[in-house]
Amino acid sequence: MEERIHPTNVDAPPPTAKNSGDTSKPAPNSKSVPPTPSTYVVQLPREQILRYPPPETAQKFHSLTRGKKRSCCRRCCYFTLCLLLLLIVSAAIAAGVFYLVFRPEAPKYTITSVVIRGMNLTSVPFISPEFDVSIRAENPNDKIGIYYTKNSAVKVFYNDVKLSDGVFPAFYQPKNNVTVFQTALKGSNIVLGSAVKTTLINAQNENMVPLVVRQKVPVKLKVGSMKTWKITTKVKCDVTVDALNDKSNIVSKDCHYSVRLW
């Protein structure tokens, strides 16, 4: 029979001889030391960390906040509408009371005479006309006075061609008053086209020259001891004269006016 040779551990160190004289304590056995407390690390998915609070909670929060915002906007709109309605009703009541107490009437304007100079249509290529226009202003109100303020304008036109301009005099017109005043209007180096000059000469030969007098007058109303803001009054008068000289007479006249409160 063959002998079996058992392998030996050649790398194992030789046993160490015990020294009887060594008094050091033997090394403690690692198995006898109690284990230290373990630290646990809990790892969560990144999506869960970023979506804190959970999606269903966030959705509920957003729905509640939207409802609050809509409710707040509705309350604001309702309050604004109520305020506007209150202002409109108050203004209507104030206007009604004002009308019943003061009974306001619009002033009346008319042109009483027109004196014309410098309208030579044959000898010179340009003209420098002058118009002295007499205007009758009537204030029919019993409790309202009228202040005619500065920055007014009065102009004379023929077929949309401006012939002269000037200003409305500034004065105060008391209640139930009629005032007739004259305003001087001047033009300088007015060049008329051939067609306009021809029609103007023909109208003069027929003793029917149509002119337009436009007035833009800012006024203030005096109600009791108070004055209103500036109110712009625009007056348009269609006037037909029989001649273009200082002896002209008015053949027909018609005045219309409009008021701009603001």
Image: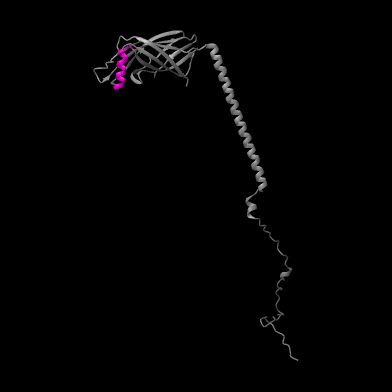
| Residues in magenta, as a range | 192-207
Q: Residue at x 61, y 29 (%)?
A: 78
Q: How many marks?
A: 0
Q: Is residue 187 visible?
A: no
* Location of residue 3 (image quadrant): bottom right
Main secondary structure found in the magenta portion: helix
Direction from residue 124 to residue 48 in the image, left or right: right
Direction from residue 222 to residue 13 in the image, left or right: right
Viewer-closest of 244 and 128:
244
Give coordinates of residue 110: x percent, y percent.
41, 11
Direction from residue 236 to residue 97 in the image, left or right: right
Q: Residue at x 59, y 27 (%)?
A: 81
Viewer-closest of 125 and 206:
206
Q: Residue at x 31, y 20 (%)?
A: 196
Viewer-closest of 183 and 163:
163
Q: Is residue 45 visible?
A: yes
- The residue lying furthest to the left in this view is 123
* Location of residue 136 (image quadrant): top left
Give coordinates of residue 146: x percent, y percent.
45, 13
Give coordinates of residue 248: x percent, y percent.
32, 10
Give coordinates of residue 157: x percent, y percent.
35, 18
Q: Confirm whether the magenta stretch covers residue 198.
A: yes
Q: Quadrant of the N terminus?
A: bottom right
* Location of residue 115 (image quadrant): top left
72 shown above or below 191: below
Name the colour scheme: one colour
Direction from residue 145 to residue 249 in the image, left or right: left
- The residue lying furthest to the bottom in this view is 1
Q: Confirm whether the magenta stretch covers residue 194.
A: yes
